[in-house]
Amino acid sequence: MTASDLLALLVLAGLTAYTVLGGADFGAGLWDLTRSRRQRDLVVRAMGPVWEANHVWLIFVLIALFSGFPGGFAVLSRSLTGPLSIALLGIVLRGAAFAFRQYGAPHGGPPVRGTALWGRIFAVSSLITPFAFGAAAGGITGGTLRADGSAGLLRPFLAPLPLASGLLAVAACAFIAAVYLTTDAYRSGESELVARLRARALASGLLAGALALLALPLLPDAFADRLAWPAVAVSVVSGGLALELMRRGWFGLARVAAAGAPAGLLCGWALALYPWALPGYAMLSPAPPATAGLIVGVLTAGLLLVVPSYVFMIRVLRADAD
């Protein structure tokens, strides 16, 4: 295994962490569309400690791509300008709306005028951002992009596969969030909220599975032949197991299994894509081996610092919230 391969695995690890942890945050914001006060309070308690910190994984992925695969980063930046700009706008609006809504609704007091608007912006941005990321992945897979960005900003992402991928990303985020929120509600003893969120977890999980099946025949033959089916099988088994555990009320175990569903699907997709940036058009073009080895060392050292700090932060802030 070369230094470039190790660097690609680190990128995949960061992308998986962002998909699961950031996806749970996006999904929690999406469920905020229901405008239930009790559920909104639960979302705030769940997201409050981590909603900013989860973006560290996105920054990690971008830095690793930029420094380790400069050619591939340039190609993807030009080709994905449309959906990535939408995703970035969603991230900014979502963070601002979450903060302004919290400041506009002081604990124990009446909400300030405009707070409801910020809540809607927060929820809609939480839907748009994962859809844009999913559409970008579908655009890469579908072969509708060009390395020079000449295919257009948005037109390639209106094809069936990018649309299905975007919807799948939204459904997956909704599923993970519903599972995690159900666990939090159960620990808080809110039985009515547990029943409501469990139903949403089951519905969104089934929808995500249906969208994944819908996307399979839309894959180009060359990409489908390279798909890492063992990883896809892990996704299917994890998703099915999470649904059954939710049905039985074993929420803690369901939380672990639910993470495996999007993680397995992402790994299967990434392994099929590697070493291409755009299949058939542009390779990832890694940095020279000596540079790649240095980057792997720096990123590994960074992870050894960030991961324990992240876990410690969650434990401390969640304990304070409880």
Image (cartoon, rainbow, N blue to C red):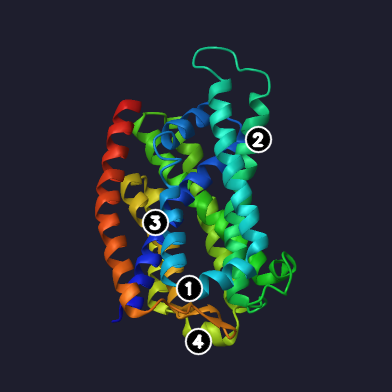
Describe the element under mark 3 as helix, strand or loop: helix
Distance (Cα) linking label 1 and label 2 = 33 Å
Q: Earlier in the sequence, mark 1 or mark 3?
A: 3
Residue at left 39%, top 56%?
A: 17
| Residue at position x 47%, y 43% in the image | 198
Does the CB distance between marks 2 and 4 fall below 8 Å?
no
Instruction: Name which residue lies at 45% across and 81% down.
Output: 275
Mark 1 in CB contact with mark 2 (< 8 angstroms): no
| Circle 4: residue type | Asp
Across and down, in percent, residue 221 comes to: 58, 86
Residue type pointed to by label 2: Arg
Task: Give SS at disc 1.
Answer: helix
SS label for mark 2:
helix
Q: Give me the residue at 51% from left, 52% from top.
A: 173
Q: CA distance from mark 1 to mark 3?
A: 15 Å
Give residue 51's quadrant in the image.
Answer: top left
Considering depth in this image, is 257 or 102 the residue closer to the camera?
102
Sequence-wise first label, 4 or 3: 3
Instruction: Estimate the spatial distance between the alpha carbons at disc 2 and disc 4, rounded to whole Å.
Output: 42 Å
Secondary structure under badge 4?
helix
Q: Where is mark 3, residue-wise?
A: 17
Q: Which residue is mark 2?
A: 120
Amino acid on which the number 1 mark rests in the picture = Trp
State which tag comes first along the sequence, 4 or 1: 4
Give whichever of discs 2 and 4 has the lower sequence position: 2
Which residue in the structure is indicated by mark 1? 269
Is 295 situated left or right of 235 in this image?
Answer: left
Whether residue 240 appears in this view of the structure is no
Check disc 4 and report the residue beneath it.
Answer: 225
